Image (cartoon, rainbow, N blue to C red):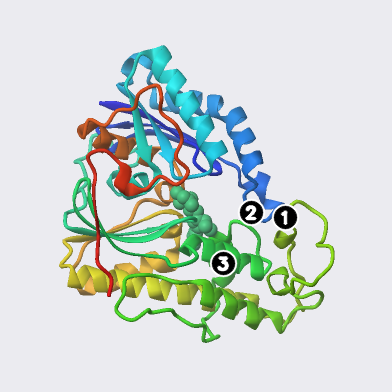
Amino acid sequence: MNILAIETSCDETAAAVVHEGRWVRSNVVASQIALHQKYGGIVPELASRQHITAITPVLQEALETAGITRAGIDAIAVTEGPGLAGSLLVGVNFAKTLAFAWKKPLVPVNHLEGHIYANWLVAPGHEGQPLPPAPIFPAICLIVSGGHTDLLLIHKHGVYEILGRTLDDAAGEAFDKGARILGLGYPGGPAIQQAAEGHRSVEQLPRAWLGDSYDFSFSGLKTALLRAAEQYRKSEPHPDQQTRKRAAPPPGPFPEHTPPVYSPNMPAGDLAASYQDAIVDVLVEKTVRAAELERAASVLISGGVAANALLRRRLESKLRAKDIPLFVPEIQFCTDNAAMIAAAAHQVLRRGALAGWELDVHPQLPWSSLPGVRVIERARG
Ligand code: KG4
Ligand code: ZN
């Protein structure tokens, strides 16, 4: 079974071919980072327009790299949500048209389920070797992306118990906002990771432990970073701190993205290291605690923030000490890609949940709405 998947939920135009839900035959991602960088964040309309121009060449390259044609494809999968409406529309319409013209089943995929199944992927180049072990259930899965921070207990395929989620900013959003405060650019996660390299966490920034809860909160941390950085500010206060009374905002489509100007003696590397340390600390502690208390047979991480080197390193060493196997997707499968959508589509197909031609986009798609999926909400104290 070969699934061709299309992913356009945010700012990456992606297509991939995956065999048997695990073997990646091709994984093509056209990143829009350069386009959005000058605005300091994603501009939704530009993202949709870029998807329209990039999607056909991306598909062509995915088929060519996989060495496959229409006849070798068994189903077309596409991300139906959650994500930006205008971006999702491009992918869904493209996939629908392809499925119609090629007479193939159309498989709708939840982007977050895609992130989970990134842990099942085997990168090209391993053909002919034994299939690497798949994650073992029950598994604890930490999904950390630009829009989500969810801690799940996966009982088995399609049965998800939500242990905790963020009460405010997602982990990736916290990285992005922190980088903006420090003037490090977009996307913030890689920028903060790079700035923190060779620096130590020196500033004691707050961690929101929230008692025994598995929920997360990063907004207090962000404010603490802003306060620490403000001392070094040369010109106007950061827009987040400007009072409502201020007259006209600076020109430009996204005035809040205007980079701040700091004195050269600001220890940006130390602040980035301290901030990264605080985010990673909470993510690791809660994930490891959940793994122990829920007697997980394995731990998985996924989403863009799962590419973070400190997070991977710390989880690895803490879980090794407890003899709990950790699964981390290759970096190329952590940030948005279509291979993970194909892997999840393999499960959607097993559940028999195909889409009809009326398939629409679902910017806020909840887990619980997926046919054949059971979502359990853990009662919170
Ligand atoms: O999963 P993803 O590509 O898109 C969403 O579904 O949101 O995640 C993007 C997020 C961004 O917030 C980005 O700053 C963050 O992942 N990210 C990282 C790293 N690489 C990407 N965060 C921390 N460290 C990284 N190395
Ligand atoms: Zn994502």
Q: Residue at x 33, y 46 (%)?
A: 113
Image quarter (top left, top right, bottom left or bottom right) of the N terminus: top left
- Amino acid at the residue labelled 3: Ile
Side of 251 where 217 appears, left or right: left
Q: What SS does tag 3 mark? A: helix
**Residue underneath mark 3:** 192
The location of residue 350, given as percent across then percent down, is 20, 33
**Residue underneath mark 2:** 41
Choose between 17 and 117: the one closer to the eye. 117
- Mark 2 or 3, closer to the camera: 2
- Amino acid at the residue labelled 2: Gly
Q: What SS does tag 2 mark? A: loop
- Mark 2 or 1, closer to the camera: 1
* Ligand 1 contact, mark 3 (Cβ < 8 Å): yes
Choose between 17 and 370: the one closer to the eye. 370
Q: Residue at x 45, y 56 (%)?
A: 145
Side of 269 where 155 appears, left or right: left
**Residue underneath mark 1:** 254
